Structures are given as structure tokens and as C-alpha cells.
């Protein structure tokens, strides 16, 4: 995770961002601290990356890199306002001894646009990540990648519209995807939980699951009920300040999957 020390909405690169509207930096930090404490309370290890001045979106660590086993594919951001974040994430993984740290050749906003579901990876294109990045992901991570297309600018990253719940289960908002992609998702996950527009708009799908608990925005009440009915424990989190930049729980969390470690979460 990356502490939102320099968080602000000073530019607009998605429809949620209004640079004219005031933000409350102290509240952003308190809300973020709460998410970090919750992860720790539930037994997850949280590693931190040092925030950098001038990079107000760096708190959204999910965009920094995709990590599977020892392999790391560092992001390449579409907007130049976030471009420099990639160097910080690259350095973090190199400094922490990861043997294979690759830098993306094509625009690739990491876990913002890809979800690891068991042995497969779902990757999206449409707004940020280049379609050609999907083949690169498959090659670097050594996993099968299914491509999906996002069509609604409010759901500009895959992690605003779909959550991996376990090795075999997902939840998603169909309205965010092209018809072909919805058909693909139906075939891959016939029993998926489907979110309604209301829960998608409060970023209910911008969630993190450890297979038992699902950390998600508090306001996604119907989704929380559906999760409970499926045997998951929903854990509601309030991140209203970060939503002003178009991010919530998952955006603040880069998941480190390592076979020798219990699932760990990196937030900033
Ligand atoms: N303001 C950031 C952007 O537009 C928000 C990123 C949210 N991150 C995510 N994983 N969806 O890039």
C-alpha cells in the first residue's frame, strides 16, 4: 500500500475527478489508515511503498505492478501525470529482492486492468491498458489471459467493474463490458455474482477478497448481502475521499501472490 501523503485531485483523467472540488487530505489519510488496520486485523501482511511528492495518485498501488509468484510486470501508465510512478514501483520490487522485474512495453495499468482468478488472468482494454499488453502479460506471468473490453467511461479500469473472489469465483457489473465480453464472462463463470448499477457506482466491485472476507466500500449494501448469502464475510470500508479520484479499496491495494507466503496485500 502507499500512504496518501500527497493525495489530491489536481488533474482529471477519469470522469470521477473534479479538480475544482475541495478534498480533505487528513480525512483521506484516516480512511486509508483504517483500511490498512483492517487488513492487519484480519492477519494480512501489509508492506508499504514510500509516497512521492508530485504524484497525487500514487496511493492507488494496484496500478503499480502485477505480481504472480516471483514474476513482476511493472506498469506503464497511459497518462503522463502518473508516468513516474512506475519507476518507484520498479525500485520497490528490485529493492525487495524480486528476481524477475519486467517493465511493460505497452500501456498497462497493472491490477487496475487485470484480475488474477486462480490460474487464469482476466485483462481489460478500452480506456487505459493496451490490448497488446495482454499477450505481454501472458508471456511474462506464464498464465492464460482472457481479454475483456470495457465500454463505460465511469468504469475505466477492470477493477471498478469486476472482483476476483476466489480461485474460481468472480463478481462483476455486466453494464461495464461489451456484449462479447459479457458472453465470455458468462461462459467462464456461470455462477458469478452480478452487481447492479447502484452498487457499481459506489465502487462496490473495487474490492479485495482473501477467499473468506471481502473488503469492499460500505455503501455497496446489496452486494454485501449477496456475498454473505454465498458464504463470504463482507467487510465494509469507508473511502469517500479517495473516491473523489476514482478509486477505492482495490485501487489502494497491490496484491502480492507468492506460493511461499500466505496471501499478502501491499497497500501504500
Ligand atoms: N485517479 C486515478 C486514475 O485515474 C485512479 C486510479 C484508480 N485505480 C484503480 N486501480 N482503479 O488513474
Image (cartoon, helix red, strand yellow):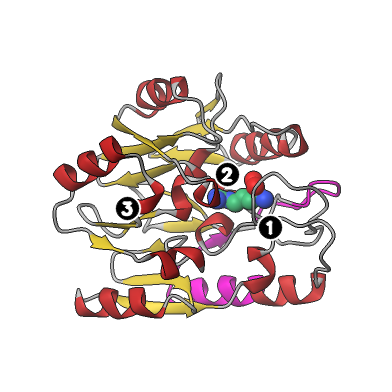
Any magenta on residue 200?
no
**Disc number placed over residue 63 in the picture, else none:** 2
In the picture of the structure, the residue carrying the numbered disc 1 is 245
Q: Which x, y percent locates residue 28?
A: 72, 71
**Disc number placed over residue 193 in the picture, else none:** none
Disc 3 crowd, CA 10 A, few/some/many (<14, 14-19, 20+)? many
Q: Which x, y percent locates residue 217?
A: 50, 73
What separation in Å lies between label 3 and label 1 (alpha carbons)? 23 Å
The reply to whether residue 257 is in sight is no
Relative placement, left or right, of 38 versus 262 is right
Any magenta on residue 48?
yes
Which mark sits nearer the N-terminus, 3 or 1? 3
What element does badge 2 sit on? helix
- Which residue is more in the foreground, 139 or 83? 83
In the picture, the quarter occupied by the C terminus is bottom right
Relative placement, left or right, of 150 versus 240 is left
Establish whether ligand 1 lies closer than 8 Å to the Cβ of label 1: yes
In this view, 260 is above or below 131? below
**Disc number placed over residue 174 in the picture, else none:** 3
Disc 1 crowd, CA 10 A, few/some/many (<14, 14-19, 20+)? many
Magenta region: 32-56
Disc 2 crowd, CA 10 A, few/some/many (<14, 14-19, 20+)? many
What separation in Å lies between label 3 and label 2 (alpha carbons)? 22 Å
Q: Nearer the viewer, mark 3 or mark 1?
A: 3
What residue sits 22% from the left and 39% below the top?
Answer: 184
What residue sits 32% from the left and 27% below the top?
Answer: 142
What residue sits 21% from the left and 41% below the top?
Answer: 183
Which mark sits nearer the N-terminus, 2 or 1? 2
Amino acid at each position: 500500500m502507499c500512504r496518501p501523503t500527497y493525495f489530491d485531485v489536481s488533474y482529471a483523467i477519469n470522469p470521477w475527478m473534479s479538480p475544482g472540488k475541495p478534498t480533505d487530505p487528513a480525512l483521506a489519510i484516516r480512511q486509508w489508515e483504517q483500511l490498512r488496520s483492517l487488513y492487519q486485523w484480519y492477519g494480512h501482511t501489509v508492506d508499504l511503498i514510500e509516497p512521492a511528492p508530485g504524484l497525487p495518485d500514487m496511493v492507488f498501488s494496484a496500478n503499480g505492478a502485477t505480481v504472480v509468484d516471483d514474476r513482476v510486470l511493472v506498469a506503464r501508465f497511459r497518462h503522463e501525470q502518473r508516468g513516474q510512478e512506475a519507476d518507484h514501483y520498479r525500485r520497490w520490487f528490485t529493492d525487495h529482492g524480486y528476481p524477475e522485474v519486467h517493465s511493460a512495453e505497452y500501456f498497462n495499468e497493472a491490477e487496475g486492468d487485470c484480475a488474477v482468478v486462480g490460474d487464469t488472468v482476466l485483462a481489460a482494454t478500452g480506456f487505459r491498458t493496451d490490448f497488446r499488453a495482454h499477450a505481454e502479460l501472458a508471456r511474462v506471468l506464464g498464465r492464460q489471459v482472457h481479454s475483456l473490453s470495457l465500454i463505460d467511461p465511469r468504469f475505466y479500469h477492470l477493477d471498478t467493474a469486476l472482483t476476483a473472489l476466489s480461485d474460481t469465483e468472480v463478481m462483476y457489473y455486466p453494464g461495464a463490458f461489451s456484449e462479447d465480453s459479457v458472453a465470455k464472462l458468462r461462459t467462464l463463470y456461470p455462477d458469478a455474482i452480478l452487481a447492479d448499477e447502484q452498487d457499481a457506482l459506489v465502487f462496490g466491485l473495487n474490492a479485495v477478497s482473501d477467499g473468506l472476507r471481502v473488503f469492499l466500500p460500505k455503501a455497496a449494501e446489496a452486494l454485501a448481502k449477496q456475498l454473505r448469502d454465498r458464504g463470504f464475510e463482507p467487510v465494509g470500508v469507508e473511502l469517500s475521499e479517495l473516491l473523489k479520484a476514482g478509486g477505492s479499496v482495490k485501487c489502494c491495494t497491490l496484491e502480492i501472490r507468492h506460493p511461499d507466503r500466505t496471501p499478502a496485500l501491499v497497500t501504500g
